[in-house]
Amino acid sequence: MNHLLCGLAANPALPPELVDRLLTLALEEARADPASQFADDLLHDLADRVDLRHGQILELAAYSDTMARYLAYRGTLDAADVDPGSMPNAAVALLDERRGHLAWARFLATHPDPEIRWKLASCPGLPHDAVDLLAVDPDEAVVKELALWTDSPVTARLALHPDPEVRIAVAANPTTPLEAVIALAADPELTLKWALSERTDLPQELYAGPAADPHSGVRATYASNPGIGQELIRVLAADPEIEVRRALTEHPRVPLDLLAELAVGDRAGWNLLPRIAAATPDELTEPAGSRHAAVRMLVAQRRDLPPHLREALAVDPDASVVRAVAPHPGLSEESLRAMVARHGVQVLGAVAANPDASGPLLEYLTQHRPGVRRVLKEVAGHPHATGPALLACLADRTSRPRAAAHPALPPEAITEPLGDEDRRVAEAAAGNPSLPRAVMLELMP
């Protein structure tokens, strides 16, 4: 029964009086057995609800500082509800979200628990007095965390810290003044090739060293760094290691002609790449008409294509291109059915993922033979799925949990999954918003 109660706790249609009963049950269980996994799961499922009253939120926060922190990060617990003395983790979370009182920072910077100070050190916008305390903390891990994340001028001072780990953290911080980073790069005691990999404002000569590093992982890390210029991009495009060339495709300013060469030379299944995502409609015209299907497929990953490009890619002779464009919004039912007629099982799952796919089309896809399991998975979570389509999904073990949670599941089938031997299925069914109120009451202890 425990997993069913957790499903109920997450059910958006659960009546308020049943939310009250579950909260009481969870708190009683937690007090009786602080190590109870069931109580912890139930409390977190309740904490995720969007309809909790303020009093219920305070009850949950009072249960533990860990729960209070969870609520703070969810945005349901406010600074007025938090005492930093009894809820230090929640107070740090609110400071991290810039919703806490800055006056808390100095108190927390001297907290006896070093883990609290370590968490505080990564919070943005801390007042100078708290930063100064953290910068001389007796725990080097706290100082290192501050050096890595602070946006305070203290980074210039920490660049001279005797601990090399702290200085490396300073070099990795995006807000450390460039002159301090350049000085650190000349420090013979430090190896900064990894630490500088996220910096985008370095002189090209500082990027050149790691870009020629014998370790391919280092070269790959720098290949996607937006700070490297066109000369280094061209050098890395000829790298003998595939991981480096693939990393370069993630660079937001890689030339489109070079990106096309990289795609043609690699049989990877690409996701939407930053350079393609940022391209203008005019820039997309040439790659969309490329003679290479791998290049056309890059464009087909966009979900905001101009209609003429979208429609051209939808009738592409290559199934991989059609599969990439099939989930694009705006495609007509006729176009989607034509894709299936031409390419069959190669595109079924992608067509089922189209947000505009109609109920009848989804039913048709679930009945297609031969079938494709991905179709059932997509249909089970599709907002347009019909009862007959969901019944087909319910018969598949992989798709069954999603189908059991779908509000369009037929009334005669909605309670059957509650007794499923797979607890994921039963819990999903208990969370189905179409579950009758009478059944919810029967499930309550």
Image (tube, helix red, strand yellow):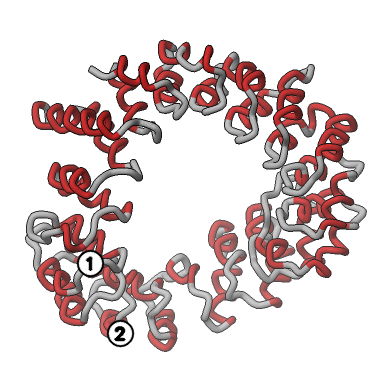
Locate the C terminus and report the quarter of the image it occupies: top left
Picture layout, residue 424 above or below residue 57: above
Q: CA distance from mark 2 to mark 1?
A: 22 Å
Name the residue: 41% across, 11% down: 419
Q: Position of residue 250 (x, y in %)?
A: 64, 61
Q: Position of residue 77 (x, y in %)?
A: 24, 55
Frontmost residue, 319 versus 63: 63
Name the residue: 27% across, 19% down: 444
Q: Which circle marks residue 38 in the picture?
A: none
- Residue type for callout 1: Gly
From the viewer's perspective, tell me whether residue 391 is left or right of residue 235: left
Q: Secondary structure at mark 1?
A: loop
Quarter where residue 124 is shown: bottom left
Name the residue: 77% across, 42% down: 326
From the viewer's perspective, tell me whether residue 105 is left or right of residue 318: left
Q: Which residue is mark 1?
A: 100
Q: Secondary structure at mark 2?
A: loop
Quarter where residue 192 is shown: bottom left
Q: Which residue is mark 2?
A: 153
- Residue type for callout 2: Pro
